[in-house]
Amino acid sequence: EAILSTENIGKNIIYKKEVTSTQALAHDMARNDASEGTLVVADYQQKGKGRLGREWHSPPGTGLWFSLILRPDIPPQKAPQLTLLTAVAVTEGINKAAGIEAQIKWPNDILIDGKKTAGILTEMQSEPDRVQAVIVGIGININQQPEHFPELLLSKATSLSIAKENKIFSRAKVIAAILERYEDWYYQYLIDGFEQVRKRWEELAVTIGKEITATTVTKTVEGLAQGITEDGVLLLKKKDGQIEHIYSADIH
Ligand code: BTN
């Protein structure tokens, strides 16, 4: 149905009709020496994992639920850069396959028309000074129709189909486009470093240049989102001119 032209990313594909979570399965496989680029993809996840311990709703057949195993030779503190790289590759892949202008909301939600259509969960297996594996989990709402979303969610979430007049997309084509963008960005990053990824991320981000409110565990900060650092930290310029570094927060 779709031709995948990548060399490493998605070279090994583990496809399951039903799974607890592709992320959990990919973790197990990584511990058992699965090679870089192994892709675990499922039609349905009984218990999809979202960020911050949330559940990720993964109904059968309508979305893309997959996890990629990477083995980058980078120190563990640089692994968050891969989350931003992933957001860039997913956004570009969606834009290419669906002809839609998706955008990134810091740190790594993918939005269409201001509503979330995809989420990214990056986890790692590491020793103190060495990454053993990075497991990148990606969930994308593709063919869900409005009736698939509970009323409350519909104001905050969307799917490619809803964004494109209920057109039904080939999930194979969407994932192929994403994996191709992924392979380009990932190997360029390993050779040249993060700067190109950072620049592209800022171009694709809705957040940058806007007045935002960031709610962290301890406080709420308002200011102008100026950009991200080398580590993916959000820089917020407050009214008094001070720059606040936001490491983790919900923003709007
Ligand atoms: C988020 O909270 O925004 C991140 C959601 C990540 C969901 C994906 S679906 C495929 C992979 N397997 C999981 O259990 N979670 C990730």
Image: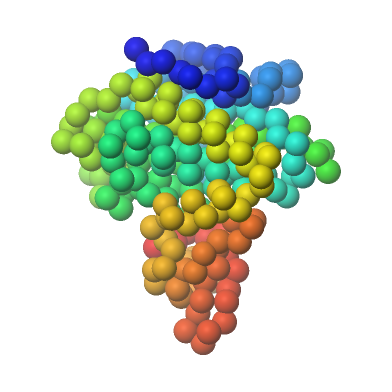
Q: Would you place residue 73 above or below residue 28 in this image? A: below
Is 97 left, or right, of 83 in this rendering? left
Name the image quarter holding the C terminus.
bottom left
Residue 220, visible in the rendered structure: no
Q: Position of residue 146 (x, y in %)?
A: 20, 36
Residue drawn 39% across the image and 68% down it = 210
Task: Tell me where residue 153 sits by quadrant.
Answer: top left
Q: Please, which residue is most extreme toward the left here?
A: 165
21 and 195: which is toward the camera: 195
149 and 171: which is toward the camera: 171
Number of numbered discs overlaid on the protein picture: 0
Q: Position of residue 94 (x, y in %)?
A: 37, 36
42 and 195: which is toward the camera: 195
Residue drawn 57% across the image and 24% down it = 9
99 and 246: which is toward the camera: 99
Which colour scheme appears in the figure? rainbow
Name the image quarter holding the N terminus.
top left
Task: Tell me where residue 139 sits by quadrant.
Answer: top left
Residue 163, visible in the rendered structure: yes
Q: Position of residue 228 (x, y in %)?
A: 55, 61
Q: Position of residue 157 (x, y in %)?
A: 31, 44
Residue drawn 68% across the image and 40% down it = 191
Q: Would you place residue 224 above or below residue 41 in this image? A: below
Residue drawn 46% across the image and 18% down it = 4
